[in-house]
Amino acid sequence: MLFDSLPHDLLTLKEASEWASGHLQKNVTTANIAYLVNYAKIRKFTNQNKLLVSKCDLISYYESFYGKREIHWKNQLGDDLNWALSFDYLKEAETTKHVHRLHPYKGKFIPQLVEYFLDNHVDEFKTQIYFQPGDIVLDPFCGSGTTLVQANELGMHAIGIDISAFNSLICNVKVTRYPLAEVRQALDRITQALKLFISKTRIHEFESHLAALLKDFNDLHFPSPEYKHKIKKGEIDETSYGAEKEQEFLTTYQQLVQRYQITLLQQKCENFLDQWYLEPIRQEIDFIFSLIKEIANKPVKKLLAVILSRTIRSCRATTHADLATLKSPVTATYYCAKHGKVCKPLFSMLSWWERYCQDTLQRLSQFERLRTDTWQICLTGDARQLNLFEILQEKQPKFAEQVLKQKIKGIFSSPPYVGLIDYHEQHAYAYDLFGFDRNDGLEIGALRRGQGKEARQDYVEAIAAVLNHNKQYLADNYDVFLVANDKYNLYATIAEKAKMQIVNQFKRPVLNRSEKDKSAYAEIIFHLKEA
């Protein structure tokens, strides 16, 4: 940039950090300023090969939404928060890109975090390269397969291990290469069969009639935006008014159910599928699954099973507000605080099935343009004792030969947290449908164990056991990265028991959380090496 066109308020990175520290009344490092430059939060100027920034740009950033959020979070979580790893500049479509959103999964990290540590860039925070194309990466807590997918994008081989058979299915479906024309034909064939199946019932006619009556009722009693304005002004008590109108419409709903002879409840209630799905939905689930089982191509069959699982997850008999945390099955119309009107449960999964079929094809096509010709596989088993070479030799013998010769360069993984998530129960519908064996008793940090002293001690022993067991497969000078919210300060002990040392820690804010709790929250990426 020409000297004459430079702003008059330029500062070096050091001057900018000193000014910002005084302006914000807290420590701002040169690395913090460099982050703003690198991620285009503020402009970059140069003069005589010096990197300069504008004080005006800094003021604008710190007064912006993102700047205020950074300052607010650092006030709560500490100045050691590495905002470069916040990825606050990314849209949700980027953090859930291509196959990463083939199926919902609680507790997964975003692909950009994996990519940051696996790729070959360096910056003020990541000062060295840990992995190269052609390396083999291990994720012993594979979850939904984020590490496997990102390793593929970067030209690396990857092995995952997970105790959950359904998690392994999701992982392997994501990294498999498919004949997309054959997939599309199979989906179209099943969709047409489902439409024919539904046409032989009165569900479509019932839902259309119900939707029309609901619209008229909601337009009258919950006009938008007037209704919500009255709630905010205190002119309407939402709880009592919503309950009153819910009861008022219920009679109409019950009359429609009788008129169209709709069976709501299933005859038995022995498992999750019996309890959380209305009878019409359950019939459609069983019908589609029967067609999927007839598919000869095993990879395509598994892919369609995952699409079905994703679909039925969205069709559970629950309110819109309780999708993430089920409370009690819903079989009738109800007042929905989320939408500010009376809503209805689902009686057919056709629309969700069609939506996810199309979405899956698009995501597979996107990934096909990015993927590399590398090996990825997730093995089902206990990472504390699974014989990786033996199982891999059975599943992918050529890859096994490469692992034996080359060894694994390192680990990138997010171990389960202590007493936070029930990894099997979150997909209970899939276990019921597909008949997978459940290994709840082998979960590390199981939700039912809680977060007490004994649970924490068992957790430390289990994570250390995973690291100790898998060290035999690692190359010399390996790098291990573990992502954890270590609020109980367990990882120093884990490293010691695994005969490793923590050589670095990267503390990052977790901004893109799906839970209702949006409070400031951080996790640490621990970098471990042989002690």
Image: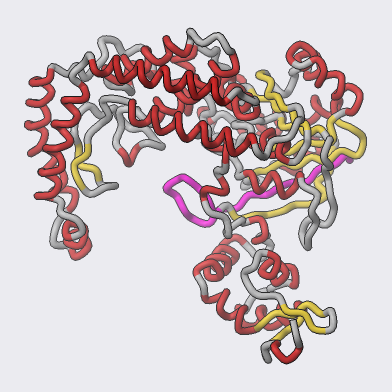
Left or right of 116: which side holds 57?
left
Image spot of residue 484 (x, y percent): 65, 43
Residue 47 quadrant: bottom right
> Considering only vertical position in the picture, is 415 above or below 437?
below
Residue occupying the point 41% across, 27% down: 311
> Considering only vertical position in the picture, is 189 above or below 64?
above
Which of the two residues, 257 or 106, is positioned nearer the viewer here? 257
Q: Which residues are magenta?
A: 511-531
Residue 88 quadrant: bottom right
Left or right of 194: which side holds 202?
left
Q: Dividing the image into 4 quarters, which one contains the C terminus?
A: top right
Which of the two residues, 141 or 279, is positioned nearer the viewer here? 279
How many numbered dots are placed on residues in this image? 0
Image spot of residue 337 (x, y percent): 25, 47
Kindly tell me whether residue 465 is visible in this rendering: no
Left or right of 423: which side holds 117?
right
Residue occupying the point 59% across, 22% down: 169
Image spot of residue 421 (x, y percent): 52, 33
Q: Is residue 45 magenta?
A: no
Q: Dividing the image into 4 quarters, which one contains the N terminus?
A: bottom right
Residue occupying the point 78% across, 77% down: 51
Image spot of residue 132 (x, y percent): 84, 42
Q: Is residue 526 magenta?
A: yes
Residue occupying the point 31% across, 22% down: 277
Kindly tell me whether residue 346 is visible in this rendering: yes
Which of the two residues, 155 or 486, is positioned nearer the viewer here? 155
